[in-house]
Amino acid sequence: MKKSLLYLFMLVCSMSMFTSCSDDDDDVKYPVDSELAGAYKGKMDVYYVGVSTPIASDMVQKVYISKASDTAIKLELKNFVINVAGTDITIGDIAVDNCALKQDGEAFQFSGSQTLELVVGSCNTSVSGTIGNGTIDMVINVDVAGGMKVKVNYKGNRLSGNENGEAKITGFTFESELITMQPVIDEDAKTITFKVSENATTEDLQALVPTITVSDKATITPGSGVAQDFTGKVVYTVTAEDGTVVKYSVSLLAKEGIYDFEIWVEDQDYHYLSPSGSFGTTNGGSALVYSSLEGIHKDNPQVVVPPYCVVPTEEAKVGTKAAHLETISLVQAKADLKEYGGFVGGIMSAMCPNITAGSVFLGTFKLDNISKPLTATKFGVLSSSGKPVSFSGWYKYTPGEKFYDANGKELNETDQCAIYAILYEAKDAEGNDITLNGETVNDENSPIVLRADLESGVATNGWKSFNIEFVSVGNRVYEASKEYKLAFVATSSKRGDLYEGAPGSILLIDDFKIEFK
């Protein structure tokens, strides 16, 4: 059922095109401003028509009603966010500019319809509902090309306007002798990180109990004082009094500067593996596509689900495990999605790149805006160990046979890997948090102070060590009094951020270390 939430995504995208007829009776005037206009807080359920079990339920959502005319309202869903199997996707502002009203006792009926042209063809769409007495109750129906029908139910209550809209974690602490660094909240990245003693066991980490404070009149799930398993990331959801929802990812920091890739944890929604600690990988971006393919494969066994880009390997240089990063071609996957996946498959095929590189980085992966996937890679964690002076480790690289650009055109080039580390200022001049991402990390104006780059990413003859000095970027100077974030990035295709590379390029990495002064 989780895969089916993608239908909701396209449904919501389509809503911005809704129109409706206004009332022809110019003499009628309804109390739009005084009784109907305002913000409404409610919940949304989504169904396939004919199926009683919802594919998504109890999604908290705010709806804004304003005056379009004396006999019509404007309906808006601002900063609309849907959750697809644990991944929040920001859709943006959705507006229905003119919904005609018709009085029905003390309430008002509204309705409208439109034929929408989506990437999969024409979809007949209608919206209808009742508003009045401080409530709104509406139904949205979409007849999708191919015969599928989707229905959305929404019910909400009008807010007074005095409700608190802040949804923040204001405090997060542990009362345990095992904690060597109390949790640090990165409000910009919505992450919380902490450190524990080297003597802490897995059982200790699974029994840690946080004390949490949140914004006035907000609620949080899981709650304060409840033990959680912090061997992996724990997601906390804060809901403001007015319905605003914010999620924070809480994770354990490995001992700063030592990254051995020995311990891996399973994602709760998609079940791929990631290195334990404050790491992000490109698996998070592939998960939506792979999840859809897995659903198709059940009825079409000839459809092959590609491997994830980042997996653990026992081909380690030090210890028992290393990280295996591989560049994957999704050309066949896109064709299978389009042929066998129906409506969802067509959407996913259009979204999916031809090439995706395997990448591991210090930071988090969070898909905030599906139209800007590179912003999902949020590089860096707060650094407290001083000035980094060197970045070392082991790697083994074998490029794939054929190199392709983003459009699938073969180029006469040989793929290269990339490994680098950066230290950058964590706050701007106004004191606001900064988090670099895939779009901003290479910007010449980014606040990177120190950088260490692998000189060449060509093929290696077996495992190869590196030891790189951090050097100043431009005229920037490290100042001990400032707050910094540290990140390293390793990828199997140097131009993977452009969706270019050679399928089959494999980068193994192990025993990374950063030394500080």
Image: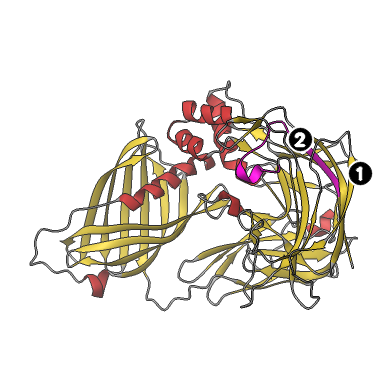
Tell us which disc is closer to us: 2 or 1. Answer: 2
* Quadrant housing residue 430: bottom right
Looking at the rendered image, the quarter that the C terminus falls into is bottom right
Contact (Cβ within 8 Å) of mark 2 with mark 1: no
Instruction: Find the magenta span and give its range.
Output: 494-511
Q: Is residue 432 magenta?
A: no
Left or right position of 432 against 240:
right
Left or right position of 206 against 337:
right
Left or right position of 482 against 19:
right
Marks 2/1: CA distance? 20 Å
Q: Is residue 505 magenta?
A: yes
Q: Position of residue 477 (x, y in %)?
A: 78, 71
Residue at 58% from the left image edge and 71% from the top image edge: 168
Judging by the rendered image, the residue that carries numbered circle 1 is 319
Question: Who is closer to the viewer here, 460 or 5?
Answer: 460
The mark total stands at: 2
Question: Who is closer to the viewer here, 448 or 189?
Answer: 448
Crowdedness near tag 2: few (<14), some (14–19) or many (≥20) residues, C-alpha within 10 Å: many
In the displayed image of the protein, which residue is found farthest to the top?
302
Please name the amino acid that badge 1 sits on: Gly
- SS under mark 2: strand
Residue at 62% from the left image edge and 73% from the top image edge: 432
Q: Position of residue 12 (x, y in %)?
A: 40, 50
Judging by the rendered image, the residue that carries numbered circle 2 is 506
Q: Position of residue 64 (x, y in %)?
A: 35, 65
Please name the amino acid that badge 2 sits on: Ile
> Could you tell which of marks 2 and 1 lies nearer the N-terminus?
1
